[in-house]
Amino acid sequence: MAANLLEIQGLTLHYGGSEILRGVDLTARRGEVTCVMGTNGVGKTSLLKAISGTHPRSDGSYHLDGEAIGPATAHALAQKGVAYVPQGREIFPFLTVQENLETGFACLPRDKRAVPAEIFELFPILSDFLHRRGGDLSGGQQQQLAIARALVTGPKLLLLDEPTEGIQPNIIKQMGDVISKLRDMGQMAIVLVEQYFDFAHDLGDRFTVLERGAVKMAGTRAQIDRADLLAAVSV
């Protein structure tokens, strides 16, 4: 059985005096999609922020590809192969598509600063819009750009926060196809935070359900019945 690329144990996180995550365990493996699910406000985004280094964890162990990760900045974790696509996309609206993609170079050595051709195979629309400003793209196109920018860094761990939010149905299907292709390449582990149940269930190999900042349910697709999972994430 493959080793875990990501292994989080007993993770806690605070915003000021408020405890947001309470002893969360999470694993992710190369060639798999691990879905983090739950209702609004349970700590899903905070978990991704802790993994990506955009908010410090308070306690807990964190191993990436067998390496123990202590306190680390988002830049340092990006250099180690962690790519984060935040909720809301956060592309640069006044930069062109090409320039947005090149912002991914920041964590790469100079000899690897190139946009891989595979990016445009996954997202062909971007090759037509290289000189268009990011802010002029549709929501679905911006989401594709945000994922493409993350892939420019050549990650071993890809974190996706609500990629279907505000996206038209045809782009949602394309997004699912891209995530499936990335998983099937077997080179990275994908952690997907998603409220759209059918999208997450169709893609997921492992599921972790959060409730009030703690793990309510966790297991593989074979271990968790679909109806039980749906009940666990329903209000």
Image (cartoon, rainbow, N blue to C red):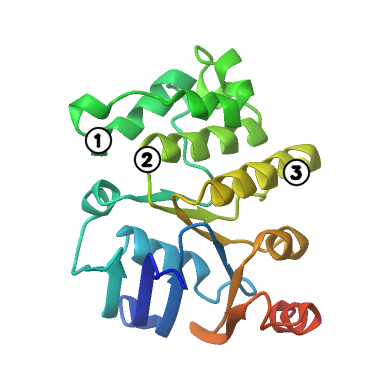
Where in the figure is residue 31, as x and y percent of width and height? 52, 57
Query: Of the residues shown, which amino acid type is indicated by label 1?
Result: Leu
Residue drawn at point x = 51 percent, y = 40 percent: 147
Between discs 2 and 1, the one toward the N terminus:
1
Label 1 near label 2: C-beta < 8 Å?
Answer: yes
Where in the figure is residue 16, as x and y percent of width and height? 30, 76
Q: Residue furthest front?
A: 1
- Disc 3, SS: helix
- Disc 1, SS: loop
Spatial separation of the CA atoms under disc 2 and disc 1: 9 Å
Query: Of the residues shown, which amino acid type is indicated by label 2?
Result: Gly
The circle on residue 154 is: 2
Spatial separation of the CA atoms under disc 3 and disc 1: 31 Å
Residue at the disc numbered 3? 173
Nearer to the camera, 180 or 93: 180
Q: Horizontal placement of 153 versus 73: left or right?
A: right
Residue at the disc numbered 1? 108
Spatial separation of the CA atoms under disc 2 and disc 3: 23 Å
Visible in this render: residue 57?
Answer: no
Label 1 near label 3: C-beta < 8 Å?
Answer: no
Nearer to the camera, 152 or 73: 152
Where in the figure is residue 44, as x and y percent of width and height? 51, 69
The part of the image, by quadrant, that contains residue 23 is bottom left
Query: Of the residues shown, which amino acid type is indicated by label 3?
Result: Lys
